[in-house]
Amino acid sequence: MRLDKLLAHSGYGSRKDVKKMLKNGAVRVGGRIAKDAKEQIDPAADEVTVFGEPVIYREFIYLMMNKPQGVLSATEDSRQETIIDLLDPEYLRFEPFPVGRLDKDTEGLLLLTNDGQLAHQLLSPKKHVPKTYEVHVEKPVTKAAADQLESGVDIGEGYVTKPAKAVILENESGRHKLLLTITEGKFHQVKRMLKAVGNEVVYLKRLKMGDVALDAELAAGGYRELTESELAALKNKKHSD
Ligand code: URA
């Protein structure tokens, strides 16, 4: 990769700032002063220093966010707040994007990364990555409805959903709730599934994606980097549930 890109991605300012540093002779590659922004660097092999300090290059970031309601799962929007607007500027240089989308009124687990390969793996319909949602609905969920949700329902345009897992939860404070685990990601899928069994979603929160669960410590809008074991679990193609 280009030297100026490596430095900019490692937190040494914009490409313009980096150009200035190069011009001033602050940057060395393998001990020799480097002035050419276009020089090709192998981050795994070449030792790059700035003012004598080794540059620690990181290519990817992996974040989990507790997406709040009312915020778009998009990288930019001219009028509405996006999940990217919630991030500290230090993360922006990695150009993260959301792994899939949650509706504006859905909250909960959203992964953000700049690792296109991992995002593709997690979103590929062939990989059947399970996603678990806490679903609050308008009316009680009958056992028959839960069975239907599990075996597949027609969500319109002749599409019948793949097998899912539906667990009816205790009715607390007048709320009818269930946990629904699906392995697909059709547009508005959970809402359409509940509609197909004569109900209506009033609140939706994603709790889990693959083997990674939402950190209960994260307040709405909060985020943190994935731990090594969470990342390893996501990269592992087999899922435990
Ligand atoms: N299903 C939905 O209907 N909405 C979401 O945000 C996610 C899954």
Image: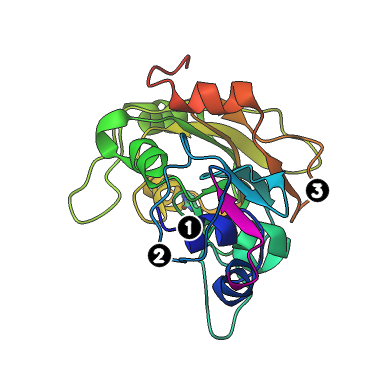
**Tag 3 residue:** 219
Is residue 24 a member of the stretch shown in magenta? yes
Measured as percent of width and height from the top left, residue 223 is found at 72, 48
Q: Report the residue that reaches farthest toward the left.
A: 158
Residue 188 lies left or right of residue 125; in this view the side is right
145 shown above or below 219: above
Q: Which is more N-terminal, label 2 or label 1?
A: 1
Q: Residue at x 52, y 48 (%)?
A: 113
Magenta segment: 23-29
The residue carrying mark 2 has its beta carbon less than 8 Å from ligand 1: no
- Residue 87 in view: no
239 shown above or below 11: above
Closer to us: mark 3 or mark 2? 2
Q: Are marks 3 and 1 in contact (CB under 8 Å)?
A: no
- Residue 1 in view: yes
Q: How many discs mark residues in the rendered view? A: 3
Tell me the distance, in whole angstroms, between the alpha carbons under discs 3 and 1. 38 Å
Residue 134 lies left or right of residue 198; in this view the side is right
**Tag 1 residue:** 3
Q: Which is more N-terminal, label 2 or label 3?
A: 2
Measured as percent of width and height from the top left, residue 11 is found at 66, 58
Q: Nearer the viewer, residue 176 or 17?
A: 17
Task: Name the kind of residue labelled 1 in the image.
Answer: Leu
Q: What colour-coding does the image apply?
A: rainbow
Q: Nearer the viewer, residue 86 or 148?
A: 86
Is residue 44 a member of the stretch shown in magenta? no
Closer to us: mark 3 or mark 1? 1
Q: Are marks 3 and 2 in contact (CB under 8 Å)?
A: no
Q: Are marks 1 and 2 in contact (CB under 8 Å)?
A: yes
Q: Residue at x 63, y 42 (%)?
A: 56
Q: Which is more N-terminal, label 1 or label 3?
A: 1
Task: Name the kind of residue labelled 2 in the image.
Answer: Lys
